[in-house]
Image (tube, rainbow, N blue to C red):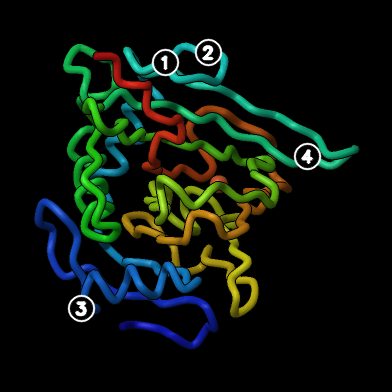
């Protein structure tokens, strides 16, 4: 463990760069801490160069904009800009990454990163889901989030615990280089935790999925730009839809 001075936050170092992620704290203890409401940051789980390349590839792919939905045959993105009164409450691009589609514009470039996150998610949750749907379970979904400089944000909200249970947020942007301020904050049972100063490029932040959280505005004093600046993350989540009834 590197740091436990902040109530509700545990910072651990990644031990190796194998096909999954492991830490000096055993994975089952990490999972138990997260499910009890502690936010965990796993430092240096991914190589910075790999993530810079992935971010550049997503920007270059210039994915088509689509209405939100479960379109899984290709990668696409959606832009949200929502005001609560006069206050900007939500501003981001979310890009769905079809990581298992060989001919897709960006899916293959994101595949190894997403697969490694999924392997860690399976180790943490004990659930078997992959990015491929099976008759008895839905596929995991992978997203790249861009919170642009100039106020990219996502106001306080929460998700259902199931089926994701433990949320994984991989940081693709470097603090002080790609952005200066704004990141993930969580309402833990131990108080509000601002993970931003600990959650640098290459680090994975873990949180209990039904815990209230937000992304505080990213560099709000700067001009808004969608050219790849700001704060980028990659997430994986379970598909919340119930299974189709089995027809015999
Ligand atoms: Fe969220």
**Mark 2 — residue?**
66
Q: Are marks 4 and 2 in contact (CB under 8 Å)?
A: no
For label 1, the crowd category at 10 Å Cα-Cα, with few meaning under 14, some 14 to 19 and many 20 or more, is few
For label 3, the crowd category at 10 Å Cα-Cα, with few meaning under 14, some 14 to 19 and many 20 or more, is few
Residue 49 placement (x, y as % from top left): 24, 46
- Residue 232 lies, with reference to residue 69, above or below; the image says below
Q: Are marks 3 and 1 in contact (CB under 8 Å)?
A: no
**Mark 1 — residue?**
71
**Mark 3 — residue?**
24
Q: What element carries label 4?
A: strand
In the image: residue 39, left or right of residue 212:
left
Name which of mark 4 and mark 1 comes first in the sequence: 1
Q: Do the residues labelled 2 and 1 touch (CB within 8 Å)?
A: yes
Name which of mark 3 and mark 2 comes first in the sequence: 3
Of marks 3 and 1, the one in the foreground = 1
Q: Do the residues labelled 3 and 4 touch (CB within 8 Å)?
A: no
In the image: residue 64, left or right of residue 99:
right
Residue 143 placement (x, y as % from top left): 41, 34
Image mark count: 4
For label 4, the crowd category at 10 Å Cα-Cα, with few meaning under 14, some 14 to 19 and many 20 or more, is some
Q: Could you tell me how far apart the alpha carbons at marks 4 and 1 are, in whole angstroms?
A: 28 Å
User: Residue 155 versus residue 109: which sits nearer the camera?
Assistant: 155
> Which residue is depicted at the point 32% across and 36% down?
140
Q: Confirm or reject: label 2 Cβ below 8 Å from ligand 1.
A: no
Name which of mark 2 and mark 1 comes first in the sequence: 2
> Which residue is depicted at the point 47% across and 61% down?
208
What's the mark number on residue 195? none
């Amino acid at each position: 463990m590197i740091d436990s001075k902040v109530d509700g936050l545990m910072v651990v170092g990644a031990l190796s760069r194998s096909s999954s992620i492991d830490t000096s704290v055993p994975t089952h203890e990490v999972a138990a801490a997260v499910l009890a409401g502690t936010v965990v940051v796993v430092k240096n789980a991914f190589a910075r160069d790999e993530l810079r390349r992935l971010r550049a590839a997503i920007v270059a792919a210039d994915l088509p904009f689509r209405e939100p939905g479960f379109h899984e045959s290709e990668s696409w993105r959606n832009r949200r800009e929502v005001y609560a009164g006069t206050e900007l409450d939500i501003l981001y691009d979310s890009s769905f990454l079809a990581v298992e589609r060989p001919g897709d514009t960006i899916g293959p470039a994101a595949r190894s990163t997403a697969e490694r996150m999924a392997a860690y998610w399976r180790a943490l949750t004990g659930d078997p889901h992959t990015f491929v749907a099976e008759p008895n379970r839905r596929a995991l979904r992978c997203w790249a989030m861009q919170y642009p400089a100039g106020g990219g944000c996502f106001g306080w909200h929460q998700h259902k615990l199931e089926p994701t249970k433990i949320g994984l947020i991989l940081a693709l942007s470097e603090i002080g280089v790609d952005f200066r301020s704004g990141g993930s904050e969580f309402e833990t049972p131990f108080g509000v935790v601002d993970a931003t100063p600990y959650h640098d490029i290459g680090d994975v932040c873990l949180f209990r999925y039904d815990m209230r959280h937000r992304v505080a505005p990213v560099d709000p004093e700067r001009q808004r730009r969608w050219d790849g600046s700001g704060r980028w993350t990659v997430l994986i989540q379970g598909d919340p839809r119930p299974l189709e009834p089995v027809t015999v």
